Image (cartoon, rainbow, N blue to C red):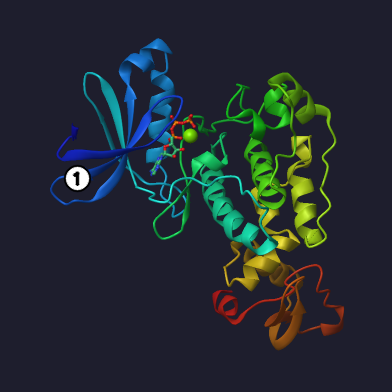
């Protein structure tokens, strides 16, 4: 099948997936041979479900995004039968719930990329509202990218009125109880993703939709017994899956939790929020920093040697569990 775009022709190669509204095809631009994913939404389907506004909203929000962990939307157009959305092609499909639970390190490798995409969205006042494995795609180079902005909303004013949005397994209590919503909706879904990565099962189950909703609302979170799991990671999961959204951490607080701070240093990834916190502390206390090298640092599986910041005014007061436990040399440059 040949698809005619505004200025190019595309050859459709194969079906990549279909969702509730459209089918996504791998297409090749005839001139350049460049591959794209093209989401095709039938206008018949749109009018049947009165979904024009939803689709326009999806396109408007998605097109406004520009981040390495979000699938790029290159262009869109329509003809008399369909709406077409031309997307960056992610050749390795979408994430799937792991058959065997991941270890802490693999969990981090996946989680920090999703978090980076969600952080970008929240900073731009966008709530995704449908974070789930099927909406996290894997690019050819291994980068994870969020897709499917069908439920996304640009926040003008908080809280956002309730609609039953997303997929029940990932829905927080405030969605299923039809309460007002805010950014913490996505935070809960991040908790569900983390839980499934680590334990290979969903945190709340049910034999039917009703029971699942009841369990999301009232059942206590059970943390399975896995003695190789870092306590800080368990703390994070528990915080993300707090039923009252007010007490759930924001994205900034996730970046400032011990497990994230430690792993970002370990993997040499710049932590903007930690850096800002450190700068603020320095400003407030008028502290100067010096770097101490070759500190031995233990994780459950590895013994690390890294350098870390200490406050030079009063080194003895330095509390390594509180802040800036370690810092590698690359981060020093960025501070
Ligand atoms: P949903 O039922 O989740 O609302 P949808 O109709 O909004 O689905 P998408 O989630 O955008 O559609 O896409 C459906 C599936 O198509 C994805 O889960 C994925 O497998 C595939 N897909 C979507 N976009 C791409 C892409 N850019 N590259 C590769 N595959 C893609
Ligand atoms: Mg989808």
- Cβ of mark 1 under 8 A from ligand 1: no
From this viewpoint, is residue 122 visible? yes
User: Who's the residue at 51% across and 30% down the image?
Assistant: 151
User: Who's the residue at 80% across and 74% down the image?
Assistant: 320
From this viewpoint, is residue 159 visible? no
Numbered circles on residues, count: 1
User: Who's the residue at 52% across and 50% down the image?
Assistant: 117
State the image coordinates of residue 229 (x, y, percent, origin top left): 77, 60
Secondary element under disc 1, as helix, strand or loop, is strand
Question: Compared to 225, does 56 lie above or below?
Answer: above
Give the residue at mark 1.
29
Q: Quadrant of the N terminus?
A: top left
Question: Compared to 162, does 67 lie above or below?
Answer: below
State the image coordinates of residue 252 (x, y, percent, origin top left): 66, 53
State the image coordinates of residue 272 (x, y, percent, origin top left): 59, 63
Residue 233 falls in which quadrant of the image? Answer: bottom right
Residue 23 falls in which quadrant of the image? Answer: top left
Q: Nearer the viewer, residue 6 or 225?
A: 225
Residue 189 falls in which quadrant of the image? Answer: top right
State the image coordinates of residue 168 (x, y, percent, origin top left): 64, 28
Q: Nearer the viewer, residue 200 or 179?
A: 200
Q: Quadrant of the C terminus?
A: bottom right
Determine whether, in the image, residue 243 is placed left or right of residue 197: right
Task: Tell which residue pokes out farthest to the front in this image.
Answer: 99
User: Who's the residue at 57% across and 50% down the image?
Assistant: 119
Ligand 1 found in image quarter: top left
Q: Nearer the viewer, residue 45 or 326?
A: 45
Mark 1 crowdedness (10 Å alpha carbons): few <14, some 14-19, many ≥20: some
């Amino acid at each position: 099948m040949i698809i005619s775009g505004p200025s190019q022709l595309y050859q459709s190669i194969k079906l990549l997936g279909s969702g509730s509204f459209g089918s996504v095809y791998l297409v090749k631009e005839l001139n350049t041979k460049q591959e794209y994913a093209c989401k095709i939404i039938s206008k018949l389907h749109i009018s049947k479900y009165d979904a024009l506004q939803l689709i326009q909203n999806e396109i408007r929000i998605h097109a406004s995004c520009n981040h390495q962990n979000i699938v790029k939307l290159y262009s869109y157009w329509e003809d008399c039968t369909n709406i077409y959305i031309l997307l960056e092609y992610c050749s390795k499909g979408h994430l799937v719930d792991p058959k065997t639970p991941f270890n802490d390190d693999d969990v981090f490798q996946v989680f920090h990329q999703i978090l980076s995409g969600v952080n970008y969205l929240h900073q731009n006042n966008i709530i995704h509202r449908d974070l789930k494995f099927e909406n996290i795609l894997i690019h050819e180079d291994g980068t994870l990218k969020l897709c499917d902005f069908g439920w996304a909303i640009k926040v003008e004013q908080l809280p956002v009125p309730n609609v039953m949005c997303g997929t029940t397994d990932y829905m927080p209590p405030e969605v299923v109880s039809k309460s007002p919503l805010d950014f913490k909706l996505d935070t809960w879904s991040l908790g569900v993703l983390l839980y499934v990565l680590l334990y290979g099962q969903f945190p709340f189950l049910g034999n039917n939709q009703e029971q699942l909703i009841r369990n999301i609302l009232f059942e206590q979170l059970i943390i399975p017994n896995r003695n190789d799991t870092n306590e800080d990671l368990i703390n994070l999961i528990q915080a993300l899956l707090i039923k009252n959204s007010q007490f759930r951490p924001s994205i900034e607080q996730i970046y400032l939790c011990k497990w994230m701070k430690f792993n970002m240093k370990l993997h040499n990834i710049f932590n903007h929020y930690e850096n800002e916190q450190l700068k603020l502390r320095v400003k407030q206390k008028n502290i100067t920093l010096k770097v101490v090298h070759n500190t031995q640092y233990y994780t459950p599986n590895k013994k690390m040697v890294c350098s870390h910041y200490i406050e030079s005014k009063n080194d003895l007061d330095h509390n390594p569990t509180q802040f800036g436990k370690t810092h590698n040399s690359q981060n020093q440059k960025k501070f």
